[in-house]
Image: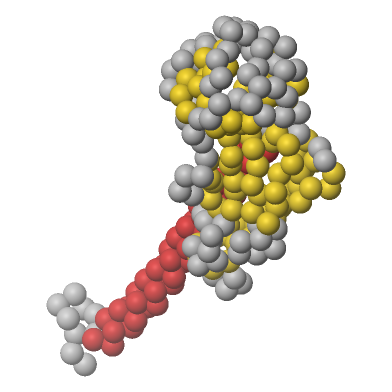
Amino acid sequence: MWKSEQGHTVTELLIAVAILSVLSAQAYNAFLSSSQRLVLQNETVEMQTDAQAAMDFMVRELRLVFGTPTITTTVTTNDTITFDRLEDAGYSSGGNATTTLNDTRKTWSPSSFTTTYTVRIISGTGASQARSISANTSTRLTVSSAWSTPPDSSSFYVITRKKAFTRTSTSDNVLRYTAGGSVNQPLADLITNHTFSQPDANTIGITLTAQTRNVAPNTGQKRQYTLTETVLRRN
């Protein structure tokens, strides 16, 4: 039988090549499986981190709800909450004109309040009035329309801003955040379901479910992560 210069037969070489091919395939499959597990593990961590960050943000915002929030359905049942967030409060220092409210104890950043903010007189002179804010200085608010009864130093006021959390489509699974009626800003993606509830006047419930981008190789299903929180309002 013909042999190579090293003394190996062709049959031996073919057997060696076959064994090497099998070992290489096994090593590649092991590497591929390990890579898939690593990718899924990273996706799972990303999903959980993003979902927790979104939940923490919603909890912080909803603790400052002023008045009664509105829970409605946009994509799935009770997946939208619209509310007025309390931004600031105080007593007027007096000396107000028909379209102003002064508070000399404040140090607001000029032009930090716009028409997306509302000032409401809660008690004292001019109570129950609400006006959009058109401009501000460090100590004065200018409202968009004149007060029916101008506030004075007995008037306690709050400044609020309309906000919302919602999803607008089941196709992108993006939880969105609206402030002052502006275009919805993405808060977290891969959110397949979330609901809001209000068990009582001072409590808001949140349930949020996220999922990974890809399926797990061993189950053929995407991993899911569900969070629930109960928000106790501060005011």
Q: Where, by quadrant of the figure, is residue 8 drawn?
A: bottom left
* Extreme residue in the bottom direction: 1
Q: Quadrant of the C terminus?
A: top right
Q: Residue furthest left?
A: 5
- Against 77, residue 231 (above or below) is above
Query: Going 64% across and 54% down the picture, which residue do you hit?
Result: 80
Count of all numbered marks drawn on residues in the image? 0
**Residue sitting at x 21%, y 92%:** 1
Identify the residue shown where x is 61% and y is 61%: 74
Counting from the top left corner in percent of width and height, residue 66 is at 70, 34
Which residue is farthest right?
200
Q: Nearer the viewer, residue 230 or 15?
A: 230
Quadrant for residue 101, please give it: top right
**Relative to 68, residue 99 above or below:** above
Looking at the image, is 85 positioned above or below residue 227? above
Q: State the image coordinates of residue 196 (x, y, percent, origin top left).
A: 71, 52
Residue 85 percent location from the top left of the image = 63, 34
Front residue of 94/186: it is 94
Residue 190 appearing in the image: no
Foreground residue among 27 and 225: 225
Q: Looking at the image, which residue is at 21% across and 78% down? A: 7
- Residue closest to the eye, 210 or 174: 174
Q: How is the image coloured?
A: secondary structure
In the image, residue 156 lies at what x, y percent?
A: 70, 18
Query: Left or right: where does residue 14 sit relative to residue 116?
Result: left
Position of residue 166 in the picture relative to residue 138 (left or right) = right
In which quarter of the view is residue 147 placed? top right
Image height of 185 relative to 128, above or below: below
Side of 85 relative to 184 (left or right): right
Q: Is residue 4 visible?
A: yes
